[in-house]
Image (cartoon, rainbow, N blue to C red):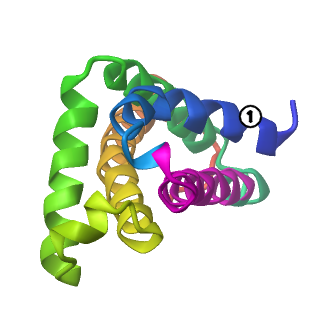
Amino acid sequence: MNIYIKWGLVVAFNSIFSLVFAADYMKTITGALGVIGGILCFIFLYTKLDLFLLRSGRKEWRKGVLIATIVTGLFSLHPALPLMSGALALEITGSIFNFPSSSFQHKDFFPIFITTLFTGVFLSILVVVFASLLRLFFFIRNPNNNEQTV
């Protein structure tokens, strides 16, 4: 499978419930572009990470990141995780960039885009935790693995 399609599908799967909650922001073209642009950034980032791991021979890390991303997506199907990460992202975006609440109400591109990025970062932190635990599991299971260490 093409690596871009793979990560497009995985990131889209991870975004399902977040898109449900972001539906109100997607009622305008600028709001929809902000959400879709943020999601496309994560497709690009995960693809580049996977290509880096592939080129550097880190097969177990690649496997761990993919599994961890899918597991995070499964957790994201419950509304609590997308709600918490989205609410935290809205709060942080508003406070760091000092956006007026009207910019969210008018569904302006930049605040919606940045909020989508923060939401993705919070979910990606879970991916890092899960991937690290999986990598540890793979290492314990096969300590003589010749894979390069990070």
User: Is residue 142 located in the magenta-colored stretch of the structure?
Assistant: no
Towards the viewer: 28 or 110 = 28
Towards the viewer: 149 or 9 = 9
Residue 67 image offset from top left, x and y in percent: 52, 27
**Residue at (47, 27) in percent of width and height:** 16
**Residue at (16, 53) in percent of width and height:** 88
Would residue 136 be visible to someone looking at this image? yes
In this rendering, position of residue 120 left or right of residue 37: left
Tag 1's secondary structure? helix
Residue position for label 1: 6
Residue 132 image offset from top left, x and y in percent: 37, 42
**Residue at (53, 51) in percent of width and height:** 32
In this rendering, position of residue 28 left or right of residue 136: right
Q: State which quadrant residue 78 falls in.
A: top left
Residue 105 image offset from top left, x and y in percent: 27, 59
Q: Main secondary structure of the magenta part?
A: helix
Towards the viewer: 40 or 137 = 40
As displayed, is residue 11 above or below residue 75? below
As displayed, is residue 94 above or below residue 67? below
Q: Which residues are magenta?
A: 27-51
**Residue at (31, 50) in percent of width and height:** 125
As displayed, is residue 115 above or below residue 132? below
In this rendering, position of residue 131 left or right of residue 94: right
Would residue 137 be visible to someone looking at this image? no
- Which residue reaches farthest right? 2
Residue 102 image offset from top left, x and y in percent: 22, 68
